[in-house]
Image (cartoon, grey):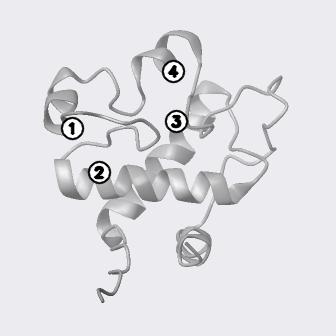
């Protein structure tokens, strides 16, 4: 019998960096976090984990055959090309105000992220 290892959390340094980036990018682009801040927290945690593991905030919501190659290609590094060009965020991190899932928040605290991601 094998015990499942708990998923390691992102480092505090990269989680804070991705949290700060996300807030600033949302404000700069006039976008909002998902109305369910749990989605926001999980995505920011995923970006931070990818930054820890790969050195870049690769989109955590996609499947990649070769993550290192994707990081080098930069297409899916956050903010990804679809977000930069058309404000289309597959992860639902940056939503335009006309999106039915958009909330009113452009801020999320470090503690909120940790609290929400500790449940998963």
The residue to which callout 1 is attached is: 67
The residue to which callout 2 is attached is: 50
3D distance between C-alphas at marks 2 and 4: 18 Å
| Tag shown at residue 25 | 3
3D distance between C-alphas at marks 1 and 3: 24 Å
Residue 19: in sight, yes or no? Answer: no
- Left or right position of 68 against 4: left
Residue at the farthest front position? 1
Q: Are marks 2 and 3 in contact (CB under 8 Å)?
A: no
Query: What's the residue at 52%, 42% (across, down)?
Result: 24
Q: Quadrant of residue 10?
A: bottom left
Instruction: Give the foreground label among 1 and 3.
Output: 1
Question: Which badge, 2 or 4, is on the more N-terminal residue?
Answer: 2
Instruction: Give the foreground label among 4 and 1.
Output: 1
Describe the element under mark 3 as helix, strand or loop. helix
Describe the element under mark 4 as helix, strand or loop. helix
3D distance between C-alphas at marks 2 and 3: 18 Å
Residue closest to the eye, 28 or 71: 71
Question: Which badge, 1 or 3, is on the more N-terminal residue?
Answer: 3
Question: Which badge, 3 or 4, is on the more N-terminal residue?
Answer: 3
**What is the quadrant of the C terminus in the image?**
bottom right
Q: Position of residue 46 (x, y in %)?
A: 42, 54
Instruction: Give the foreground label among 3 and 4.
Output: 4
Residue closest to the eye, 82 or 60: 60
Query: What's the residue at 59%, 40% (across, down)?
Result: 93
Describe the element under mark 2 as helix, strand or loop. helix
Q: Position of residue 51 (x, y in %)?
A: 26, 51
Question: Which badge, 2 or 3, is on the more N-terminal residue?
Answer: 3
3D distance between C-alphas at marks 4 and 1: 19 Å
3D distance between C-alphas at marks 1 and 2: 9 Å
């Amino acid at each position: 019998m094998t015990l499942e290892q708990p998923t390691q959390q992102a480092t505090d340094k990269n989680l804070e960096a991705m949290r700060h980036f996300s807030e600033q990018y949302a404000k700069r682009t006039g976008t909002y976090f998902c109305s369910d801040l749990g989605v926001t927290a999980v995505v920011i945690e995923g970006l931070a984990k990818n930054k820890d593991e790969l050195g870049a905030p690769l989109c955590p919501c996609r499947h990649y055959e070769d993550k290192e190659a994707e990081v080098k290609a930069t297409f899916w590094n956050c903010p990804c090309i679809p977000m930069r060009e058309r404000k289309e965020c597959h992860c639902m991190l940056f939503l335009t105000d006309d999106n039915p899932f958009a909330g009113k928040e452009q801020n999320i605290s470090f503690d909120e992220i940790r609290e929400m991601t500790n449940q998963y």
